[in-house]
Amino acid sequence: MTVITGRVRTQSPPSLQRGCDRLYSHVPTSYTQIHPVTVATLSQFDFHHTLADTPGISLVMFGTTDCGSCRHLKRVFAEMAVLDPQLHLFEVDAQRDTALVREFEVFHLPSMFLFRDGHFHCPLHSPATPDALRRHIDQALTAPAQEAP
């Protein structure tokens, strides 16, 4: 039997396996629990510099820690990072970095913005599933870039 300790998968001693089989048999194990994925956090002080230095496609999520939809989207971002390692994923704490919230005219949380080679491409509106996000990203990239807010 395998027991999850934090985010690292470890083998439990044989003496504990018999008792733990019943205790942990109902606990699902997801890939992101076993292999932690970090989504880089940007602040108003490093936002533009970091994105300018990031080649390829970047997706930025504005959210807060007390927003349930934001927490769900962050888990979806972790899945996306595993499925598409070429996609650069970032998050901005909307409560802490209000200057960026005003700059990007964020009116609802979570909000997502797509960047290509460090340049603003468009706001992204998509259901919070990996397949839908990928599909909406591909559709957005076929359209011409919009003007930055």
Image (cartoon, grey):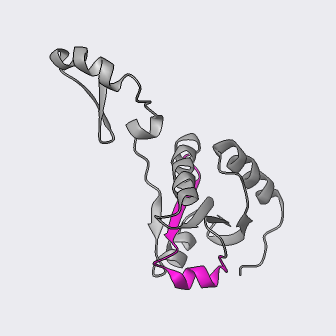
Write down the quadrant of residue 14 in the picture: top left
- In this rendering, position of residue 22 left or right of residue 115: left
Write down the quadrant of residue 55 in the picture: bottom right
Q: Residue furthest right?
A: 143
Whether residue 93 is in magenta: the answer is yes
Q: Residue at x 75, y 47 (%)?
A: 135
Image vertical order of residue 90 relative to residue 73, above or below: below
- In this rendering, position of residue 73 left or right of residue 23: right
| Residue 32 seen anywhere in this rendered image of the structure | yes
| Residue 1 seen anywhere in this rendered image of the structure | no
How many labels, in total?
0
- In this rendering, position of residue 79 left or right of residue 115: left
Q: Position of residue 123 (x, y in %)?
A: 72, 68
Q: Residue at x 72, y 69 (%)?
A: 121
Q: Position of residue 58 (x, y in %)?
A: 60, 61
Q: Position of residue 148 (x, y in %)?
A: 72, 79
The stretch of residues the image draws in magenta is 85-106
Q: Residue at x 38, y 22 (%)?
A: 25
User: Which of the image's four quarters has the N terminus?
Assistant: top left
Nearest the viewer among 134 and 20 is 20
Image vertical order of residue 22 relative to residue 10, above or below: above
- In this rendering, position of residue 80 left or right of residue 46: right
User: Which of the image's four quarters has the C terminus?
Assistant: bottom right
Q: Residue at x 68, y 72 (%)?
A: 120
Nearest the viewer among 77 and 84 is 77
Q: Position of residue 118 (x, y in %)?
A: 61, 70
